[in-house]
Image: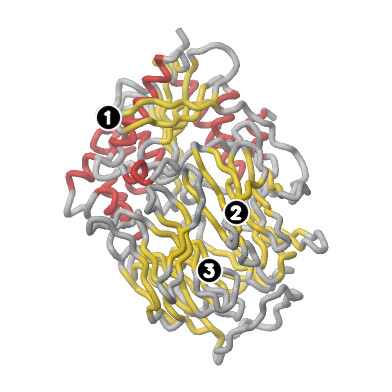
Amino acid sequence: MPDWEKRFRAPRVGLPDWAEDAPDRSLFVSNATGTYELYTWDRATGEQRQATDRPNGTTDGTLSPDGAWLWWFSDTDGDEFGVWMRQPFGGGEDEPATPGLEPSYPAGLALGRDGTVVVGRSTDEDGSTIHVLRAEGHGETAERTQPVEPAEPVGAMEPMKPVEIYRHRESAGVGDLSHDSTLIAIEHTEHGDAMHSALRVVRLDGSVLAELDDTRGGTRELGLACLGFPPVDGDSRMLVGHQRGGRWEPMIWDPATGGETALAIDLPGDIGAEWYPDGSALLIEHSHQARSELFRYDLATSALIRLETPPGTVSEATARPDGSVEYLWSSAERPPGVRSTTGRAVLDPPGMKAPGSVPVTDAWVDGPGGTVHALVQKPEGEGPFPTVFDIHGGPTWHDSDAFAAGPAAWVDHGFAVVRVNYRGSTGYGREWTDALKHRVGLIELEDIDAVRVWAVESGLADPSRLVLAGGSWGGYLTLLGLGTQPDVWAVGLAAVPVADYVTAYHDEMEALKAMDRTLLGGTLEEVPERFTASSPLTYVDQVRAPVYISAGMNDPRCPIRQVENYVRRLEERDAPHEVYRYDAGHGSLVVEERIKQLRMEIDFAERHLPAAN
């Protein structure tokens, strides 16, 4: 078996989540069976159990605070449209967890320690709705502040009546439920800017306690994020992420009084935070220049203490009741693993270990909108190399010094890989992310092209053997780049792409319609020229490079009809192309399917690239 396939097949585990009042009961995601599924783990006994088993995998789940129940989201073949189910932690039959609520796209879930359930939903018909479910006759709040023996489910689920407390056409979702189940935080974009949320705190009946909505110059340009209520009954404060300083950083807001407390955290880059279980400190996740690290921030003294983690990327982290921190770490060179600040092993999946890859180096390139950061991996030997520009999705995301099996596979096959954090990427300040407006797609391609010129001039990349590739938004930029820069790219590889922006807008889920209105500055009827200018279909007749497209038949984000429109135009021109359609949604959770798709992409590129000079 080649190393590149081993990296996909080697068993992996995600960061374990744990039940608030039963911290020995944990939940994690693993690909141990060849499909990513949910597993329960009793730390006291060491017992691990595969909890879900579906053809297209399951990754969205959580534990009830008492550890008695596993909640998981059940969709159909990856279409992201479904209902919440639950099963006893120790195993048993699945049952509908939110009876009375019709299937929807999920928009957040919060489980209270007293049995209160808050469910966020999104549908094309209703927009965003939030519902509170409580057992009939239930009204008392549990007074429990210390971990207890895990409860065991008994009998059938108590009757739960959903009560709608929120409804709006724009995007909204559940932020958090307070520790005593009296307050609900809602993130919403009622102002029409899907890139920047506002916050509303309501009581269980939906009555409003407070609003927090950052504005500048009369227009919403600053985002807010709910980072959670503290784990203390009766404490109405909330940890909030804000962008007032031009980047993401935390503060504490008390919706009961309106008071705000700034935090003295003098670090460059973006800063995320979550509460320690006793509420005395914050776990700080610091991201800067595509790397990340962890700190403990003491709320009483404002002391910021660095937690030792290796150089690379911490993709997830959580503080445990004993004060230790568990985190999921990797670098481009070393595969991911779950680690602890105690030095003890957390989860070490059995079986084959994933081979490492080559380290990543940084490139800083002058672009039309400022300095562009790119991450580079290359094989042994002297360049210029055939080079894959592997473009990330999102678009509000960024590539980092983290392990990725796809780029590592290209390096194994003799390709250099360049990943570009174009304008629109997170991690480089608010202005860099928010630059992605109105000339959508074309802006990102300007930055990608600046890095392409650098890669060629530096001797890294062979200008006649350049591959433009990506998935989701990266797939969209691939198709748009092939049409707007037809003389540059030798091959294009687009996975689950936006190919026809107009049709995609009609067919996609409602939350993405809202994002498109924000990115393009209006609806299709209001700014049709912007939709046209940003659509790959507009430029399809200019595409010269052979193009490979893969698409999920059940994809709600980049629906299949708009992909077929693009493919039909390629067929009419007899343009060289191949299309692979598979029975899943926006990507696959099946390991062999991922390997198959990458194998087809590598084969397509090697068949269509010209020979080296």
Query: Tag 2: residue type?
Result: Ala
Q: Name the outermost residue toward the top.
A: 613
Give the label on residue 79, or none: none
* C-alpha gap between disc 3 and disc 2: 21 Å
Residue at horizontal 64 percent and vertical 33 percent from the top: 5
For the residue carrying disc 1, how many other residues have a C-alpha within 10 Å: few (<14), some (14-19), or many (20+)?
some
Q: Quadrant of the N terminus?
A: top right
Residue 423 in picture, x, y percent from top left: 35, 38
- Relative vertical location of residue 319 with respect to residue 608 in this rendering, above or below: below
Give the label on residue 303, or none: 2
Residue at horizontal 37 percent and vertical 56 percent from the top: 223
Discs 3, 2 touching: Cβ within 8 Å: no
Q: Which residue is mark 3?
A: 229
Discs 1, 2 touching: Cβ within 8 Å: no
Q: Which residue is mark 1?
A: 484
Is 541 left, or right, of 311 in this rendering? left
- Relative vertical location of residue 487 with respect to residue 529 in this rendering, above or below: above
Please tell me whether mark 3 or mark 2 is closer to you in this view: 2
* C-alpha gap between disc 1 and disc 2: 52 Å
Res. 459 image quadrant: top left
Q: Secondary structure at mark 2?
A: loop
- Relative vertical location of residue 146 with respect to residue 529 in this rendering, above or below: below
Is 76 left, or right, of 336 in this rendering? left
Res. 538 image quadrant: top left
> Which label's residue is closer to the chain start, 3 or 2?
3
Residue 332 in picture, x, y percent from top left: 59, 33
Residue 519 in picture, x, y percent from top left: 29, 49
Q: Secondary structure at mark 3?
A: loop
Residue 358 shows in the view:
yes
